[in-house]
Image (tube, helix red, strand yellow):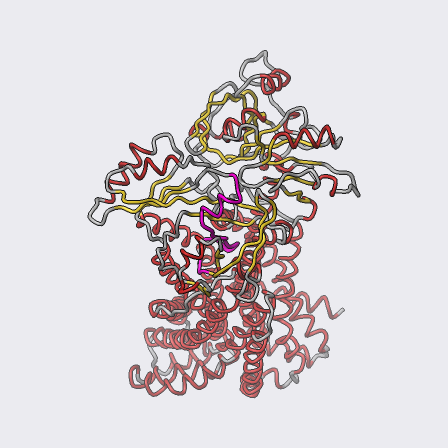
Amino acid sequence: MFRPIIARLSLRHSSRRLLQSLLFIVGVALGVAVVVAVDLANNSASRAFALSTESITGRATHQITGGPAGLPTALYTTLRLDLGLRDTAPVIAESVRAAELGDQPLRLLGVDPFAEPPFRTYLQTIEVIGEAEADAFTALTDFIAQPGSALISQALADRFDVAAGDMITLRVGARQVEVQVVGLLQPEDNVSRQALDDLLLTDIATAQEIAGLPGRISRVDLILPEGYDTSIITGVLPPGATLVDNRSGGTLSQMTAAFEINLQALSLLAVVVGIFLIYNTVTFNVVQRRATIGILRSLGATRDQIFSLIVGEALVLGAIGTVLGLALGIIFGRLTVGLVAQTISDLYFNVNVTGITVDPFTLVKGALLGLLASFGAAFVPSLDATRTAPAGSLQRSALEERTRQALPLLTGAAVALLILGVLLLQIPTDSLFISFGALFAIVLGGALLTPLALVVGLSLLTPLTGGLFGVLGRMAPRAVVRSLSRTGIAVAALTIAVSVIVGVSVMIGSFRSTVANWLDTTLGADIYISPPLLQSNQATTDVSPALAEEVLAVADVERVSTARAVTVPAPDYPDMLPVNLLAADFDVAMGARRFVWNDAQNGDSQAALAGGQIMVSEPFAFRRGISPENDELRLLTDEGPVTFEVFGVYYDYATDQGTVYMNRDTYDRYWDDPFISSIAAFVAPDADLDAVVDTLRTDVLIGYALNVQSNRDLRQGVFEVFDRTFTITIALRLLATLVAFIGILSALLALQLEQTRQYGVMRATGMTPGQLRRFTFLQTGLMGFIAGVIALPIGVALAVVLVEVINVRSFGWSMDFSIPPQELLVAFLVALVAALLAGIYPALRLASMNTVQALRSE
């Protein structure tokens, strides 16, 4: 009988306090939305890459890959005829561009149509081509028998208004090959459509012509029966070839795991801020209804029933906020996926994401997070409501007295969390979960110091504010401290949000400064000629070395250095993840390159490189455990496995997967690969650099799919990628600040409702509406001021952990720590302005308050 009455009371209270309920719901919704959006974006980008990879690998259980020059086609014959492996397929995989298809990177796949059926089903999904009488069989016949024919997806053709029967020109380096689209691939479902969106299919002969690989193939796909003795295959492989088991997986997750964990951790900070908001709202709910709770307790309501009343309301509002958050998360996910995909494309591999994939597990995780956050934040105030005696619940001062009594306990918990965070950082591990656990402990510990900081800080500020603003300046600090149970939580939420701004801003500033210094010491040439990056940090275009002579012949070009960027297998590397290898005529850093350590005699890295030794970048050394005590690396060359001596580790920020750097003569000794990938040109000191660049573009590089950039333009391009990489972190910081803003607004509205009678007395004794507004703004300004002051050291500590610990464990990069003063000023102003803006609505309400009604309120 009693529980339905309590339920009706709960519903009536929530409907009468609509704004308060909405703030609760919005706080939960934003926290859930951020986590769901980041999760959906990460999953969609990963799934897009997985689909693209699957569209290339098909059902192959194993692959045979070669070095930069690929494999001889005779190997396919040996496998199929001599070893009797019928489920084998030769493949050529290359990245190309076509002006008719938007000049975007396309994945060229050259296949043998007769060997394809066990592996890929593309040829079964060909639509009718141009003429009405043509059909899929005709298209397939043309694809097999007609030289220079190609198939593309229906979606790609529709996007660029290309019809079957049209001619398109494919470009790879200096090669331009015309092919005819003889058919369109029409996938059966949306998943397959996304997988084939940027795929261009040709037969082997056409692909060899396009890629410039006569008599060579990129790899051989195999479907091997369970338990097959793979040593039979490895016994016939030529030097430089390796057999890879596709079923081991893990390559994608290894490359992007750190990036995704970092994003998810930042998104969880928004949830932490939201928890403070929920706690604030539920606490106010308890205080606001102290009279009702006291009456219910006097009439016989049990502690369990009171607990159920408060927690039940929180869960109902939390459920509404969670549902709204899930919907917003899907919307935000659609906006965020482009940022995440672009960052992954810049840092790891090209990802073509056409939409988001809504994983039910992500929605379940978001729902549980929202409900658990609501319950966790409501538990303490709900339990507190049950412990209050009926008479005590009618006293407003009881809660504030308990808050004051709990101040030493909160301060002790804050110190304990800070010590825990420091101790966790001392654990010798690469675990990001432990690192982020330490980070959260430090942030929460700092936030729990907020009540003490408010009491101490405002007591110190009272003489100053009293001198500046008179009576109002003395009243405002006391009002904030007197309502510590309300203001402490609101300021703590704002402190966390602003500390995140400080920490991430300092980290980004330190990274930007480090990258600028790295570019100064690394980009020694005046002009750089390279192919467009089809995949992050991998120039896949084969360029004839004769081009270097043409560049050198241009007036005012004094010398050039060529480089070859390839990926090669490392036999000892987990899951055979390929190694980025860069071979250059000479190091264009010209002795200015900075090293983590360098064992070369007299520090002469050029001499060490010329002697056949190699150097590796810092991220590569981090991932492979390269050190002065472990200075050898085994690579699979065209001559077989070769062990190279590592003489040094250099600072590099081009890719977190790392790079192996060697002299071109050493590379030519072990790999049969005459091509180059890029050219660095040095011009005369008094030369007109822009004129030289124009000459190269208009006279020398006509017909080449190559970019020409001056040192200045290349630096600008690097920072454009840099800014894109951190765009999503800026968005996450703004969302956290928005949640904190709502927390301040909620606290002020709560204070206004709690102290309505007090404000009525102020008006009745002569305080004007303008003075009431200034009184409110003084309170909010002081709250924002204290939050900003506390957030600065917490944010700097957060930045130290991000730069010195998490960044190194995530990506292997060492950065120079620097604190840009302007970032600290901006963060402080954010705290102050957010608090002042949150005070506008409560101030306007106070100014229009009815004094008589206020005096009658209880």
Q: Residue at x 64, y 43 (%)?
A: 242
Q: Which residues are magenta?
A: 650-672
In the picture, measured across the screen, residue 29 lies left or right of residue 507, that is: right
- State which quadrant residue 550 falls in: top left
Question: Is residue 765 a member of the stretch shown in magenta?
Answer: no
- In which quarter of the view is residue 58 placed? top right
Q: Can residue 666 be found in the magenta stretch?
A: yes
Q: Which residue is the extreme one toward the left?
A: 686
Where residue 613 appears, as percent x and y from the top left, is 49, 55
Could you say which is closer to the camera, residue 741 or residue 827?
827
What residue appears at the point 48 percent right and 77 percent down from the top-left corner?
A: 487
Residue at 43 percent across and 82 percent down: it is 479
| Residue 112 appears in the rendering | yes
Q: Which residue in the rendered view is the most extreme toward the front? A: 611
Residue 68 on image: x %, y %:
53, 40
Percent x, y for residue 23?
52, 64
State the image quarter where residue 294 is shown.
bottom right
Q: Position of residue 746 (x, y in %)?
A: 49, 69
Quadrant of the drawing holding the N terminus: bottom right
Q: Nearer the viewer, residue 410 or 483?
A: 410
Q: Is residue 200 left or right of residue 61?
A: left
Please indicate, yes or no, whether residue 840 appears anywhere in the rendered image: no
823 is higher (above) or lower (below) than 761 = above
